[in-house]
Amino acid sequence: MRLKRKSPDVTILLAVVLLLMIGLLMVMSASSVRASYEYEDPFFFFKRQMMFAVMGLAVLVVLMRFDYRRLSPIANGFLIVSLILLLALFIPGVGKKVLGSTRWLNLGPASFQPSELVKLAVIFFLAKALSRDQHQLLDLFKGLGPYLALMGFIGLVLVVQKDLGTALAICGTMFLMLFVAGARTKHMGWLFGAGVGLVALAAYIEPYRMRRITGFLDPEADPQGAGYQLLQSLYALGGGGLFGSGLGQSKQKFFYLPEHHTDFIFAILGEEFGTLGAAVVIALFFLLIWRGIRVGVTCPDAFGSLLAVGLTAQVGLQAVINMGVVTGLLPVTGITLPFLSYGGSSLVFTLAGIGLLLSVSRYSPR
């Protein structure tokens, strides 16, 4: 199919740039105390995040100009390579353990999260496979079965690596792509029920996950233990009021709130910019998701449509999970907020995904 290429979706690009700017501002503010204490440089984390942002934007621009249809032939190989790198974390000395979780691959002075590569690889693979075999999804075992096996394998590996948040984000994205591609509603209902049961089982067999559940249900029952992080997050959000305390004026970043510049940066944003500031960030994510869905719906080919849906769902689900955790609507899972949280691998690969979404938008009528 010959498609006419146009300019990328300006709304998506604007929303991402604004979120990225807000993220850099918040990393600078939220990390300044820890950076001063550990590295004697209040801008240590900010400078690193700025470097990754520049790298990510460069990748975004390149991929935005790239014809997304060229991804189809390499989708299978890309998935295999990403899974090999993910499994390499089990090799002693290869995986880097941080806060009890082995998620990083040692690359000398740097580290890399293979799960971020898996996020993109799964979307490419499903977009290619489902665009060709949509009619087979009606059969539970022959059509849907292989994809469920892949979902289960990736989820199991990530849970064993103590990365339940990423497992939920990836499996949730696969679930939505299968549903959009035409899987039967009753089959997806059974899958959703099974998924909830497996998540409950994963929480039950790991004591630290059960503590997170109990801390989520009643944080005040153990304010210095299981409920500590959630309570400190709520204190930050509540302390911001409507307009916030002002940039750099957070009290919770003085080692009260753990992970204040990574997983819980949204709480610091709410403290410094108030409910209005938090609402602006939520609105930008909604704008990004809406336009991404529109790109998927209007794309003239099935591969591009499913690719856009998957890339949008990945960002949307991760944002919903993170903000749900920070506001006490979901148990603590350990997942970053796209574009805002500190983290090189996450930022670069998320911007790469946006670059491909913009590539699809260049061929979609608006």
Image: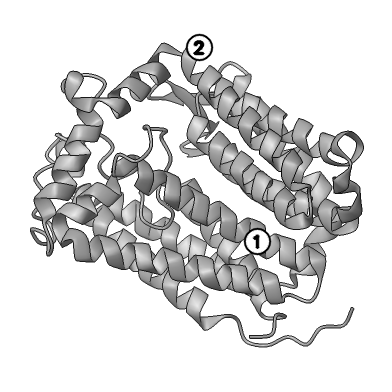
**Residue kind at label 1, given as amino acid type:** Val
The kind of secondary structure element at disc 1 is: helix
Q: Looking at this view, is 140 or 357 the one in front?
A: 140
User: Dividing the image into 4 quarters, which one contains the C terminus?
Assistant: bottom right
Mark toward the start of the polypeptide (1 vs 2): 2
Near mark 1 (Cα within 10 A), the count class, few <14, some 14-19 or many ≥20, is many
Q: Which residue is mark 1?
A: 309
Q: Looking at this view, is 255 or 344 the one in front?
A: 255
Q: Which residue is mark 2?
A: 205
* Left or right, 198 with reference to 138: left
Q: Looking at this view, is 345 or 194 the one in front?
A: 194
Residue 116 placement: quadrant: top right
Query: Which residue occupies 61% across, 73% down?
Result: 294
Query: Which residue occupies 81% across, 66% down?
Result: 302
Residue 19 placement: quadrant: bottom left
Query: Is residue 218 in view?
Result: yes
Q: Are the residues at dot 1 and dot 2 in contact (C-beta closer than 8 Å)?
A: no
CA gap, disc 1 and disc 2: 34 Å
Image location (x, y in percent) of residue 198: 59, 23
